[in-house]
Every structure is written in C-alpha cells, then in structure tokens.
Amino acid sequence: MSALPQPVTAAEPRHFLDLCDFDSATLRRILEISSLLKRGGGPRAPLAGRTLALLFEKPSTRTRVSFEVAMRQLGGEVTVLTDRDMQLGRGETIADTARVLSRYVDAIMLRTDRVWKLKELAAHATVPVINGLTEASHPCQLMADVMTFEEHRGPIAGETIAWLGDGNNVARSWVHAAVRFGFRLRMASPQSCQIPLETLAWALREGGDVSITRDPAEAVHGARAVVTDCFVSMSDDPGRNSAAELAHYRATVALMRQAAPDALFLHCLPAHRGEEVEGDVIDGHWSVVFDEAENRLHAQKGILAWALGLLS
Ligand code: CP
Ligand code: NVA
C-alpha cells in the first residue's frame, strides 16, 4: 500500500502590518527592490497568475489605485471589495473571511479603522496580509515617504525630520520609521493629540531619537524635511481634535523658512490647504507631495514582491 502524501507545512505568510515588526535590513531590502522596479529592472511580469484582494472599510484614492496599478504592472490581478460588498458587513467573522479569501487569492490588503480587524485577519489568513491604513498606523505610506526623501536628499539616516500637528496613524508610522531607518524625529503637537506615550516609550526602548515639543518652531529648526497630515483623520470622532489648538501647528511659509535651507515638505495627502498647510507651502518649491504619491506605487511593488516571496 503506498503511503499517503504528507501534508505540506506552509511557511508562515509574510504579513506587512507595521514597520516596527521588521528589522532595518528587511525594510532596506524592500526599498531596494522598489527602486529597482521603479527603474524598470527585475523580471518581467513577476506576479503573473497572482491575485491581490483589496478590502476597504474606509475611502481611498491613492492606496486603492496604486495597489491596483502596481499589481497589474507586475503581471497580477486584483479584486476590490468594500465592507458593503462582503458578507463581513452582514456579520461573517473576520476569521472566516480570512480563511476563505486565503483559498482564492495570494495576498490581502485591508484598510480599516479597527486595528484589531487587521490583526485578526493576519492571525487567520494563510496568505500575506498588508496594512493599507488603520487608525493606528500607515506603514505603506512611510515606505513611500522614506523613498521620496532619499531620492531627493540622499540617505535619511542621521537626518532630522519634523512632524507638525496631530499625532495620528501616519505620525505613529513616522516614529516606527525613525527608529528603523535611523533618523531623528522632532514632533510638535498639542498635548491633546500628541502620539500615544506607549509609541514614544517604544521608540526610546529601541534606541530611537524621537522627541515631542509643543513649539512648532523648535521642531522645524534646521530640519531637512517638514511633514504634516490632515488635522482630522477618517477614524476620528467628531470634535476629538481642537481646530483652534491645531491651527498653531499649521505648516506655514514662516516655519519652512526656519527649517534647513533645502528642506522638503511632505504630506501623505489628501491635503486641506489653509488648514494643516498653507497653499504656498504645499504648492511651493519645498513640496514633493506628488513624488510622494507616485512612490506609493513603487514602494508597494517592493512590498508585494517581498510578501509574495520574490525576494529573500
Ligand atoms: N495617502 C493615502 O493613503 O491616501 P488615500 O487615503 O487616498 O489612499
Ligand atoms: N491620517 C489620515 C491619513 C489619510 C491617508 C487618515 O487616517 O484619515
């Protein structure tokens, strides 16, 4: 009697959930692949036959389009679903959704305002899960942001970057990036919406150089890049953030003039001119926000290549 085939033990899926989960070398390797693919290098159609599911519980322009185009340019396919399209919206569990989707697709990206859902999805999926933004972080954005800084100004390690405004999901990913990519991060926020103390404590434990001030001029002084984001995020309860308090942290021309002479301005977009940033800053010579938006496409190709095992 011939022996039954042994079940194959699948390797652990390569989730991309947060920059703090990675060592610096892996993040660097992903960015190298992103740059290689941006230059047109690498194999042709490396993701032919692979499908990515894009799950959106919150709106998106950049994340949706850049992942769709990235997958297609790499030879793969996508299926895009919102919570209204799925049985998830009628009470099917995340765990069952993860198990089912894992039988159809090769990777899953989720945008949600409940980070526990991302963790639950990753715990039960047998394919890689990618964080397309939660209320707690936005790691794909930071891969594009680091790539953009380095394309314009060279290695980010050792540089000083200033964050202005709400200590939101993007701000927390900036903290993770500061530690993993080795740059100094000075954050200016009102006390009511500074980054959570546990995020700061994590950075300090990891040996990072991250500080918080109430004074935006102190944060931007000599900084090589100034970064901000909207004052009200998709997951915020109405009234959480005080517009009057945050107005003091707007990225203004006056503040940009106190940064390094060749400082860049970054913003993940969407932007609100006259709220978190003056029009003359985001539309001025400092701004690289559209390069940053473009680099979502290239950075995510690197993330997909890593997650789907195309690089070690
Ligand atoms: N920056 C960013 O994630 O944009 P979207 O919300 O349009 O995806
Ligand atoms: N902090 C913003 C980022 C949008 C890309 C939000 O969560 O709405």
Image (cartoon, rainbow, N blue to C red):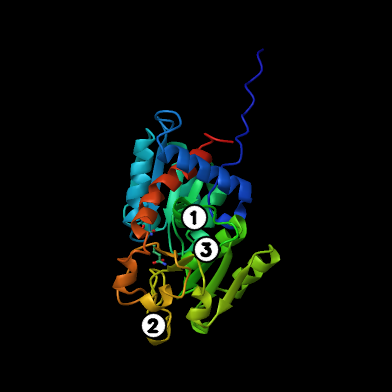
Q: Is residue 84 above or below residue 169?
A: above
Expressed as whole percent of the image width and height from the top left, the position of residue 5 reads 62, 22
Q: Residue at x 42, y 34 (%)?
A: 50
Q: Position of residue 144 (x, y in %)?
A: 45, 53
Q: Nearer the viewer, residue 75 or 53?
A: 75
SS of the residue under disc 1: helix
What residue is pinned by disc 3? 174
Q: Nearer the viewer, residue 141 or 267?
A: 267
Indicate the amino acid at tag 3: Trp
> Which sits earlier in the primary sequence, circle 1 or circle 3?
1
Q: Residues within 10 Å of mark 1 (few under 14, many from 20)?
A: many
Residue annotated with mark 1:
146
Nearest to the observer: residue 306 or residue 102: 306
Rendering coords of residue 205 (x, y %): 70, 66
Of the two numbered discs 3 and 2 on the same chain, state the one appearing first in sequence. Answer: 3
| Most foreground residue, 158 or 197 | 158
From the image, tell me which residue sits under label 2: 247
Instruction: Say which quarter of the image contains residue 267.
Output: bottom left
Give the residue drawn at x 52%, y 71%.
222
Image location of residue 192, percent across then percent down = 50, 83
